[in-house]
Image: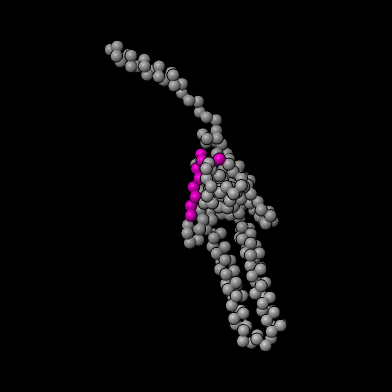
Amino acid sequence: MEISKKFHPHPNLKKLYYSYLALAAAVPLAACLFVLYAAMTYAPEIWPGSWPYLMIPLALVVAIVAFVAYWIRKYYDSITYTLTSEEVLVERGVWWKMKHTVPYARVMSIDVIQGPLSRRFGIGSVQIYTAGYTGPAGGTSGPGHRGAEASIWGVTNFLEIREAILKHVRSRPLFGTPKPQADVGAEILKELKSIRKALSR
């Protein structure tokens, strides 16, 4: 991974979102079409005067699906990730821009998550957790409903990203080997000798 270079999710993330949209829209679309079919087949006498009203739910569903499809493309374009030498940056948002910054020194654990559809498209997510954080600011909730402070999702090299972050995290004082502290007793003795020497003058 290149340090401080922004990168985007893989284009397959859009395909994943479109798949979710298709699954969510299937039921209302099927219901609207069934109502139209039933009216045409079993009540042809009322069809000429009622079809404009029966088309309203279908038109609403189609409009909502079209809007969400447009939003998915704009939202995908807004997502950027950056791994600097000190922190992880996640930026996203179409109308409300959000920027999440997580210093490596605060990172407590990192999870890799892949759902069934994500595996189908060859993408996954890296969930970054910090001590005591429970909100969903950086993305979706992780295992045990504990919110990740930052999420890098929709990427194909999620394992590589995880290892790159862990490499930086392990070099921080929280995870690395603690630096040897100075001998407090020796420091006190040195200070007392300095005071005694000053008084003897």
Quick check: 69 above or below 172?
below
Query: At x 66% / y 68%, what residue is drawn?
Result: 27
User: Where does the image place residue 146, in percent across and percent down from the top left?
Assistant: 57, 47
Specify the color scheme.
one colour
Main SS, magenta region, reads strand
- Using the image, determine if residue 59 lies above or below residue 190: below
Query: Residue furthest toward the top?
Result: 200
Q: Where's the N terminus, which quadrant?
A: top right
Q: Is residue 90 visible?
A: no
For residue 57, what is the image quadrant? bottom right
Which residue appears at 36% of the width and 15% of the height? 193
- As for residue 183 lying within the magenta part, the answer is no
Query: Is residue 107 magenta-colored?
Result: yes
Image quadrant holding the C terminus, namely top left
Residue at (50% x, 58% y) in the render:
93
Across and down, in percent, residue 163 comes to 61, 42
Q: Position of residue 36 (x, y in %)?
A: 66, 79
Give the x, y percent position of residue 32.
65, 74
Does residue 114 appear in the picture of this structure? yes
Viewer-proximal residue, 188 or 82? 188
Start and end of the magenta stretch?
98-108
Above or below, comparing residue 118 to residue 175 in the picture:
below
Tell me which corner region of the image, top left, top right, bottom left or bottom right, holds residue 16: bottom right
Q: Identify the residue at the far left of this view.
A: 201
Instruction: Look at 67% across and 77% down and name the residue there.
Output: 35
Number of marks in the image?
0
Nearer the observer, 144 or 11: 144
